[in-house]
Amino acid sequence: MKADLHLEIELTGGVTATKNGFMLVIKGQKGETKREYTHPHISFEVKGNKIILAAVKATKREKKIMNSFEAHIKNMIKGVQEPHIYKLRICSGHFPMNVSISGQELIIKNFLGESVPRKVTILPGADVKVNGTEIIVSGSDKEVAGQTAARIENLCRITNRDRRIFQDGCYIIEKAGKSI
């Protein structure tokens, strides 16, 4: 059954939103995030301190997409108020690893005794810090912070060895405030 759908999202805590074409820009105390929302049947507008999503004669598919847009916008609002934080644990049982940050690269030296260091590029918008045996990735955009943490974890992937014995690597232990 087709029906008209409207969703309203409140902006609280000094958060402002602007619309530039299909681009939604949300600004807050801790930064700003941008994202493009394009769909032929779903429109959005910013009125005062509300973001209004609307769809005329929407089907189940448009309702699902609209709810996804709502979740993304809420994550953007949370991110500009308090950054999304991902924590990784450095585990080295066989060889002591050396993890450092050089510019926009994270470098892991002596991983499983390898002579060539492993490197990964840090995505723009993510802030990475190394504290002892923890790597902390934070950012106002949840997808950028999560993708950076996933790249770091994937950098230490071990192949052709027994995973029960070779447990060295960097593993995500906390995703955006939720312990794993």
Image (cartoon, rainbow, N blue to C red):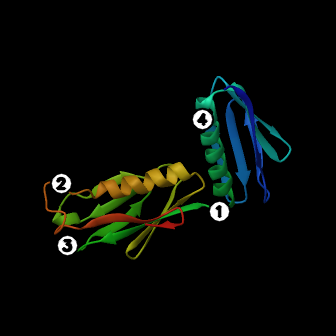
Residue at image mark 2:
159
- Specify the quadrant of the image occupied by residue 81: bottom right
Mark 3 closeness class: few <14, some 14–19, many ≥20 residues within 10 Å: few
Residue at image mark 1:
82
Look at the numbered discs 3 and 2 and tell me whether their residues touch, using CB distance below 8 Å.
no
* Front-most of residues 101 and 16: 16
Q: Amino acid at mark 1?
A: Glu
Checking the image for residue 95, the label placed there is: 3
Look at the numbered discs 4 and 3 and tell me whether their residues touch, using CB distance below 8 Å.
no
Checking the image for residue 65, the label placed there is: 4
Foreground label between 2 and 4? 4
Checking the image for residue 165, the label placed there is: none
Q: Amino acid at mark 4?
A: Ile
Answer with mark 2 or mark 1, whichever residue precedes in sequence: 1
Q: Is residue 155 above or below residue 26?
A: below
- Cα separation, mark 1 vs mark 4, equals 26 Å
* Front-most of residues 120 and 34: 34
Q: Residue furthest bottom?
A: 132
Q: Amino acid at mark 3?
A: Phe
Answer with mark 3 or mark 2, whichever residue precedes in sequence: 3
- Cα separation, mark 2 vs mark 1, equals 37 Å
Answer with mark 2 or mark 4, whichever residue precedes in sequence: 4
Q: Is residue 121 above or below residue 66?
A: below
Q: Position of residue 59 (x, y in %)?
A: 63, 27
Look at the numbered discs 2 and 1 and tell me whether their residues touch, using CB distance below 8 Å.
no
Residue visible at 29% across and 71% down in the picture: 91
Mark 2 closeness class: few <14, some 14–19, many ≥20 residues within 10 Å: few
Answer with mark 1 or mark 4, whichever residue precedes in sequence: 4
